[in-house]
Amino acid sequence: MNIYNQRGLCTWLACFSLSLAAHAADKPKPAFQYQSGDIRVSIPTADEPRVKDFGPASLKLAAKYLEDGALTWVREKSCVNCHTTGPYLAERTAWTKQFGPASEEVHKDFVGSVPKEVKPVKETETRGYKHYPSTFYSVWRSLGLAEWDRNITGNLSEPTERALRDLFERQSANGAFVSHGEVEIPHITTDYELSVQAARAITAAPGWLAGLKDESLKERVTKLKDYLRTGAPKNDYDRVLKLQIAHYLPELVPANERAAALALLSAKQHADGGWCVRDFSALNDWHFEISDTVRKLVTNLPDAAKPESDAYMTSLAIVLLRQSNVPVADPPAARHSIHSSVLVPLASGRVSADGEVVDCAVVVVTDHPDPPDPQTHSTSKIMSRPDAPEVPETRAR
């Protein structure tokens, strides 16, 4: 399966993680991955049916999978998170023309979660690690609301403005946004990555940066930029995220750093055309601590000795390349044709990666502001084209 079409199409995988690997061993296994009212989404299995061809039907299934997951989370969990509703609202709004409006119910839930009054937040400490409570909730809430305003109304809303002010009450002294909590693999939330999402939020919110007059907020934005510019990456995952910073805030990443990040990303590509997130960090370097649950989960994987390509990192790598204006037919990127053995759409809307079902849904993101209509987009049109347009508005994570 070549994942590019005539307009420079690339695949983005919105990882709706079950993980928290974490569902402790003493908890009963649920009957469904997502279940609420009439919504029933099956548990991922290695033998679930695959689709014959990647085309419009796969895109519609993927969109429905994302919708069902987000609605279930809102109705049953009632919190903004970094692996379901956060990515849903951050990405889905850009696809209104292709798949219809994003969920008003999810948006209403986000708006309702914004504090009515923005107050100072007290920093806390966990085992010597300083952080502000609910930081990643605030980051993803702000990003989702900002993208809604950008893609749906075109105007900055009062709840989004309030959410952004609340966000900066949770900024650490070094300018970063940090979280205390489990690092989920393959979905990763490092401090640098979370700060990148904060940068996305302030650049997505219509007119927010340009119209900023509050001197305190201006200082905090400067601190965030300084951290993103000079903060020491914890691992190679953080290093390649420099490419996203170069996309959203290009003045922060000099040409030599961008080139180094591109070279690093290219060097990590597997022979089958994919990437694996586990290649980008030693297990203990993802966060300030790794629980025994996650450590055992990762070290006991069948491919632990030689990690295989995974859908999450493969798709993120492609997004980074396209955001960096790497042409689809670029010779060093010739291996970027992702073979069907790496990303295989399933009948459920999820994806199989090298035979292993990944809790993800395929959503296509193009570097063209007018993505292809899933009604007319066919497998026969999925091909590379040297003159694919370079439009710097792809905002996928």
Image (spheres, rainbow, N blue to C red):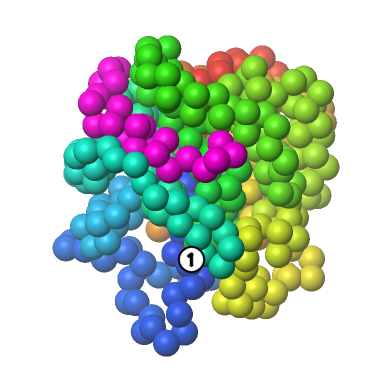
Determine which quarter of the picture holds residue 296: bottom right
Determine which quarter of the picture holds residue 165: top left
User: Residue 2, image x and y in percent?
Assistant: 63, 39
Q: Locate the N terminus by quadrant.
A: top right
Q: Residue at x 80, y 39 (%)?
A: 264
Image position of 223 with respect to 387: above or below: below
In this rendering, does residue 345 appear at all? no
Q: Secondary structure at mark 1?
A: loop
Image position of 155 with respect to 76: above or below: above
User: Residue 370, image x and y in percent?
Assistant: 43, 19
Q: Residue at x 81, y 49 (%)?
A: 271
* Residue that badge 1 annotates: 19
In this rendering, does residue 251 appear at all? yes
Q: In the image as oriented, which residue stretches furthest toward the left?
A: 37
Query: Which contiguous range is marked in magenta?
Result: 151-175
How many residues crowd around disc 1 within 10 Å: few (fewer than 14), some, or many (20 or more)? Answer: some
Name the residue nearer the viewer: 165 or 235: 165
Name the residue nearer the viewer: 221 or 40: 221
Amino acid under disc 1: Ser
Horizontal side of residue 307 vs 95, given as left or right = right
Name the residue nearer the viewer: 71 or 53: 71
Magenta-drawn stretch contains 219: no
Magenta-drawn stretch contains 168: yes
User: Residue 44, image x and y in percent?
Assistant: 45, 67
